[in-house]
Image (cartoon, rainbow, N blue to C red):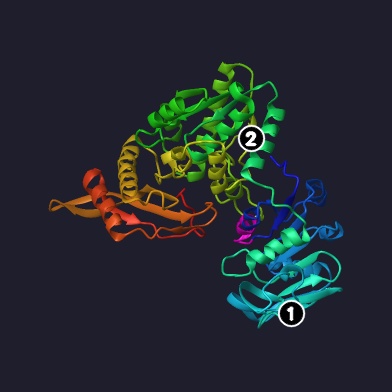
Amino acid sequence: MNLQQEKILILDFGSQTTQLIARRIREQKVYCEIHPYTMELDKIIKMGPMGIVMSGGPASVYDDDAPVSDPGIFALDIPVLGICYGAQLMTRQLDGLVERAEKREFGKAELEIVNRGGLFAGLETGSRRYQVWMSHGDRIENLPPDFMVSAQSEHSPFAAIRHKEKPFVGVQFHPEVAHTIIGADVLRNFIFGMCNCRPVWTMHSFIETTVAAIREKVGKDQAICALSGGVDSSVTAALVHRAIGDQLTCIYVNNGLMRTGESESILQFFREKSHLKVIDIDAESYFLERLAGVIDPEKKRKIIGHGFINIFEQEAGKLGDVKYLAQGTLYPDVIESVSFRGGAVIKSHHNVGGLPEVMKLDLIEPLRELFKDEVRELGLELGLPEEAIFRQPFPGPGLGIRIMGEITGERLHILRKADVIVLEEMKSSGYYRKVWQSFAVLLPIQTVGVMGDERTYENVIALRSVDSVDAMTADWSKLPYDLLGRISNRIINEVRGVNRVVFDISSKPPSTIEWE
């Protein structure tokens, strides 16, 4: 729903921190979108951005296959900020020189301001040196015509540059990361000082524009909403219901991959605490039959995604002339499922890459450009109770992507019992609301153990707990040893078929939060 009047466009050249740029801009209550660097000039013009950010990236601008955006953006009279690779590409496209640096800069560096205008306007006058974060092996050697230096570092004589007359600026450091202590100031100067944006993008304004867009799109037609009980689908249902009221029917599908008691509690919540029309479908056998013998995680996701759509379309047919399907797709889902950089898709989310190419229903995805924390803020603005908003994320494919290998009734039983223990202990310890997500994973291996002086050869449960803000990046939770010990002890003692528990201490990236 791109109805925001003022927006910043971010062209992504493959930086691991591109999403951070978007978050920092949105924190200033200004809307922004990430698009691939290959975005065509006419689409950029049609989008009408107030400013353009060219992100960093791992390539060198002088490589034969270097990613290159349309240089026509510099003829649009729109402010452009180049960050790291983006600054180097700006330099090269405007006839400056970029070469491999004799001494690379990675990590903390000291930036010396030589001109306080532009990006550095308003900084404290008592200091000229600030800590920034660098990550580059190339550097700007010669400025393009009519450019001037704004800041320098020990190994970068042109660590920040700007055009003398036009609104083009570049920085060799990364203002979006926390280690750059003046990063927020730099981005604010670009957003407000150069782009003249207003801080008007709030969840309240988002509701107003999105509700109006949904009403206009749906008209007098009927819509259904895929309701899983999670935060995303709950907020989607509430938002669409506000727009079209009783024209919306929510459908909850039990795919047989839910946690213990999950389906019952979800249905009870929505029937007792909401005004939504909810239909529940028991499709356990439907999904488990189609997943039998399937090991590849991409195939699992696609089978589950196609299965949901088939059921939704069947139910829509029973309701009459339903034309629309609303679902809670988020920005991280889109970014992981659609490659911006010509590389491989990370994984197909069941509601993005897992959808069939031909669908009878037209999609409504009002949260498609929001991060998870923004969705929670939106839910509170819509008046949803905290118990619905602050649940930990649970994947649409359910336990199907937390069972490595084949999904069987026996393996589902083992994982469900282990999952109950994880949730009970996280909640009783007070850590459930402190972490982003915590869950159990059933591994496709067995190990030797000893129980009651007898040899066992049984399954392994992996415990995964991560801290995050938006699911784009995450770090493993530093849970207390005694909590980990209780979880492990209970699982091994209470779940038959498990004799070992391990703890996942990998971050995202390089790992993903879910194992499949």
What residue lies at 24% left-to-right and 48% top-to-bottom?
Answer: 490
427 left or right of 217? left
Q: Looking at the image, is 245 positioned above or below residue 378? A: above
Among numbered discs 1 and 2, the one appearing first in the sequence: 1
Residue 418: quarter of image? top left
For the point 54% across and 47% down, the residue is 372
Q: Position of residue 423 (x, y in %)?
A: 34, 45
Range of residues picked out in magenta: 15-23
Q: Is residue 77 above or below residue 87?
A: above
Mark 2 residue element: loop
Q: What is the secondary structure assignment of the residue under circle 1?
A: loop
Is residue 198 in view? yes
Percent coordinates x, y for residue 480 in the rendering: 32, 59
Q: Which is nearer the eye, 446 or 433? A: 433
Does residue 212 sit above or below 34 in this rendering?
above
Does 79 appear in magenta?
A: no
**x and y percentages locating residue 426 in the rendered image:** 34, 49
What amino acid is found at the position of numbered circle 2 in the picture?
Glu
Q: Which residue is mark 1?
A: 114
* Residue positioned 73% across, 59% down in the render: 192
Magenta segment's dominant SS is helix
Q: Amino acid at mark 1?
A: Val
Q: Is residue 41 left or right of residue 275?
A: right
- CB atoms at circles 1 and 2 under 8 Å apart? no
Q: Which mark is residue 357?
A: 2
